Amino acid sequence: MSFDRLQNDLHEAIEGVNRYNPENVNDLAACVQAMVTENKYDKDIVLTILKLFQLNPEKYDEAVVRQVLLKTLMVLPSSDFALAKCLIDTNRLGSQELRRIFDLGAVLESCNFAVFWKLVKGTYKPSTSPTEPFKVPGEIAKIIKPMVGFEDAVKQYVCRVINVTFQNIEKTLLSRLLGGASDKEVTALAKKFGWEAKENGAVFFVANHDATIKTRNIDEKIQFTHVADLLTSVQTPLAL
């Protein structure tokens, strides 16, 4: 069954008091799988199934939880990934597979796109530090491979970050941040986000952030009547 059909049926099924009916788990899981294969997303559905897993531990399915976490990473910079993590019981967080996704999320949330693309392309070299999060970097590529549109979603996220942090960006840097994107792809994304090509296309004008800064005057008003009341309420100490 298609995602759209499942989504429509589920939104009727999880309304009101029936929202956390454990009988909905299988249908919700099927809808999450459809999100993965059809590159769709529904925040309400993914958070509902995580809550149901909390309320019904016997129905917990880590494979579905991994899919949900990865789908929420695909909608960064929204807070859905953080919300999803909060809906996973602490006794489940030690799972090695979940830890890999949490570490991947930390890389993306910190906008460390160079590390992300190295992990995806298999060129990441783990350090010898005991705290190295990606001791087996090849596992990351395996985790995200079934997630249709994952890399494209990250590229959209990269562009949103650039939109609010850069005034001008060189085309070569933009390509690197997008994982070595081709000129055609860079140009298409720049056009989508409304960036103007300059210097024969070598630089893109993103936005004049100085022009969008709005000053605000904050007036702090002191109620002197209250101060007077306070002063008159203070008793003068007795002279010794």
Image (tube, rainbow, N blue to C red):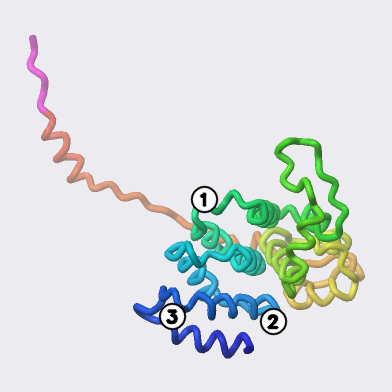
Residue matched to label 3:
14
Report the magenta residues as a range.
235-240
Residue matched to label 1:
91
Marks 3 and 1, how far apart at CA: 27 Å
Dot 1 alpha-carbon crowd within 10 angstroms: few under 14, some 14 to 19, many 20 or more? few
Q: Is residue 76 visible?
A: no
Please tell me whether the stretch drawn in magenta is mainly helix, strand or loop.
Answer: loop
Tell me whether the residue at label 2 lies in contact with that at label 1, contact meaning CB atoms closer than 8 angstroms.
no
Q: Quick one: SS at disc 2?
A: helix
Residue at 70 percent of width and 79 percent of height: 37
Residue matched to label 2:
38
User: In the displayed image of the protein, which residue is found farthest to the top?
Assistant: 240
Judge depth for marks 3 and 1 and give the one in front: 1
Where, by quadrant of the figure, is residue 30 drawn? bottom right
Q: Which residue is at the front of the view, 170 or 232? A: 170
Residue at 7 percent of width and 16 percent of height: 238
Circle number at residue 56: none
Above or below for 119 versus 226: below
Where, by quadrant of the figure, is residue 3 drawn? bottom right
Q: Amino acid at mark 3?
A: Ile
Q: Amino acid at mark 1?
A: Asn
Judge depth for marks 2 and 1 and give the one in front: 1
